Image (cartoon, coloured by chain):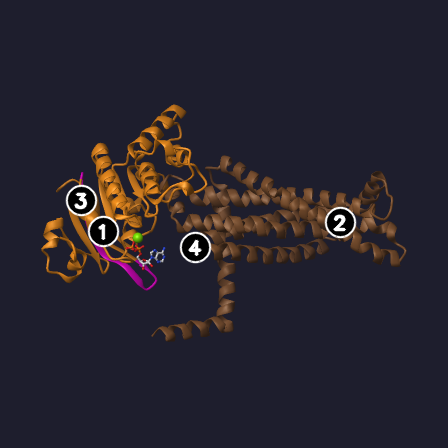
Amino acid sequence: MADNVIEIKGLKKSFGENHVLDGFDLNVPRGNNVVVLGKSGSGKSVLIKCIVRLLEPDEGSITVLGENVLEMDHDELDRMRVRIGFLFQNSALYDSMTVRENLEFPMRRHWFDITKEDADQRVNEALENVGLLYAADMMPADLSGGMRKRIGLARTLILRPEIVLYDEPTTGLDPITGREIVELIMDLQQKYNTSSVIISHDMQVARMTANSVVVLADGKNHAQGTFDQLKASTDTQVKQFYEGVT
Amino acid sequence: MFWRANVFTFGSNMSKNSAWKEIFDEVGGISYFTARFFREGLRPRYEWQELLRQCYIIGYKSLPLVGITAAIMGMVLTVQSRPTLEEFGAESWLPSMVAISVVREIGPVITALICAGKIGSSIGAELGSMKVTEQIDAMEVSGTNPFKYLVVTRVLAATLMLPVLVVLADGLALYSSYIGVNLKDVVSFKLYTNQVFDSLEYSDFLPAFVKSYFFGFAIGIVGCYKGFNSKKGTEGVGHSANSAVVVASLAIFIIDLIAVQFTDLLGLN
Ligand SMILES: Nc1ncnc2c1ncn2[C@@H]1O[C@H](COP(=O)(O)OP(=O)(O)O)[C@@H](O)[C@H]1O
Ligand SMILES: [Mg+2]
């Protein structure tokens, strides 16, 4: 069996009568980028929120780094969440804190005994990584969308996660900034050697990052393959995404 | 089929049944939230630093507003009561009368209502926007229990700070009442304070003080509940802030009503 960092089987999640995920399967091999494509409202965010248990699935199994996430108690879950980074769609920076405090927050919360020097050094390194060292003392409200995304990325990576989940990393950005963010993601991915799930409906992202592409439709893993394999597909659900892509 | 759906929701919103259902849902939701507050608040880890920060924000930053309102209230009450008391030849009762009304009822209730507006709406809006921009989710995956970090601290801070604000408001109201008395009379500060303290008993002060804790608790809980259950979008956040104020103000009057029955039963009136 290949070395999978994430294995999802038969995942189901409904909100009342709205069956969002209806038996979804997914494997993420170590070191790979899996891009999950889906229309708006197809349940992409629900999927990655289930992986870190921000949402409780109704059925199915989720194994992350060899451990069953759904059977974890609170402390085990906290330890697992250090190993999984999550980049939220709108970056989710804490409005009431400066950029520096935003980056310090996950460290202080997970590593109680971290020293001031150590924390400072990590914050500086994280900000340098995204080219925003000068923004350390700014408030999130004063940052542009692209800058917020970079800071969000820095905050996500500061704990050195082994797996990173990206929720629509380019949505809401102009194409050029979006491209820069994707390039940054790829650079940092190589530097820190992470595996990732990237959810998106942006084909640019899929083309640039994906080792494999999964199409999420009707709550299921509708199709899977490399970017070029799916490009050749005749399935209508798959073709929708490739329309206009050369 | 758009018009059809609209007609349907319009109809059901208008019916009495759904209004009652909404009220029961609200009461149920807030009760559940309150139970969760006690369950999570009692367990470690305790967020002391955030609690202190919230006490500062909720208590200290509300001082100017509460102070100005209290001062005006004491003055107006004094000036307005004088003619009536004069009619009965009882103007010497003025300080006592004002003191008793301020300490027993007007001080706590007005302060609580002002705070429902200021604190309740700001908690509702802050947590609401944190909710819809996924900051609360981000906290959760950062090894922090958002309920403890955000809700427990704010509710505790509001509960602890409101009585302090009420005492300060009472003091200021009585001081400005002293000025009000002196607009027409000449009464020394010493005589005035003697009169005030002679007329006040513990049974005037204590129930009002205890009641203020409940006012503070209600403001905190309702604000947090509304924020935590905010709907998506900016409209949702605005609605959270707005309904936090409305529900908290209503809760204050209901608590006031219950409190007066209680003190009556205990013979403290
Ligand atoms: N907490 C929730 N409560 C109720 N419904 C939800 C919740 N989260 C998501 N949904 C519903 O699940 C569906 C998928 O949402 P989502 O995963 O956010 O879509 P997307 O693929 O655009 O990320 C939507 O219909 C949404 O309304
Ligand atoms: Mg989404």
Q: Residues within 10 Å of mark 4 (few under 14, many from 20)?
A: some
Quickly name the residue at label 2.
B75
Q: Position of residue B199 (x, y in %)?
A: 82, 47
Quickly name the residue at label 1.
A202
- Cα distance in 3D space between marks 4 and 2: 40 Å
Q: Is mark 3 within 8 Å of ligand 2?
A: no
Q: Is residue A61 left or right of residue B95?
A: left
| In the rendered image, residues at marks 2 and 1 fall on the same chain | no
Q: Secondary structure at mark 4?
A: helix
Q: Is residue B74 left or right of residue B32?
A: right
- The numbered mark 1 sits on a residue in which chain? A
- The numbered mark 4 sits on a residue in which chain? B
- Cα distance in 3D space between marks 3 and 4: 34 Å
Question: Looking at numbered disc 1 in the image, what kind of residue is underneath it?
Answer: Asp
Boundaries of the magenta span? A14-31
Residue A208: numbered disc: 3
- Cα distance in 3D space between marks 3 and 1: 10 Å
Question: Looking at numbered disc 2 in the image, what kind of residue is underneath it?
Answer: Met
- The numbered mark 2 sits on a residue in which chain? B
Q: Secondary structure at mark 2?
A: helix
| Depth order, front residue of B48/A160 | A160
Q: Position of residue A53 (x, y in %)?
A: 32, 47
Question: Looking at numbered disc 3 in the image, what kind of residue is underneath it?
Answer: Met
Please indicate, yes or no, whether residue B263 appears anywhere in the rendered image.
Answer: yes
Residue at image point 23% right, 44% down: A179
- The numbered mark 3 sits on a residue in which chain? A
| Depth order, front residue of A168/A179 | A179
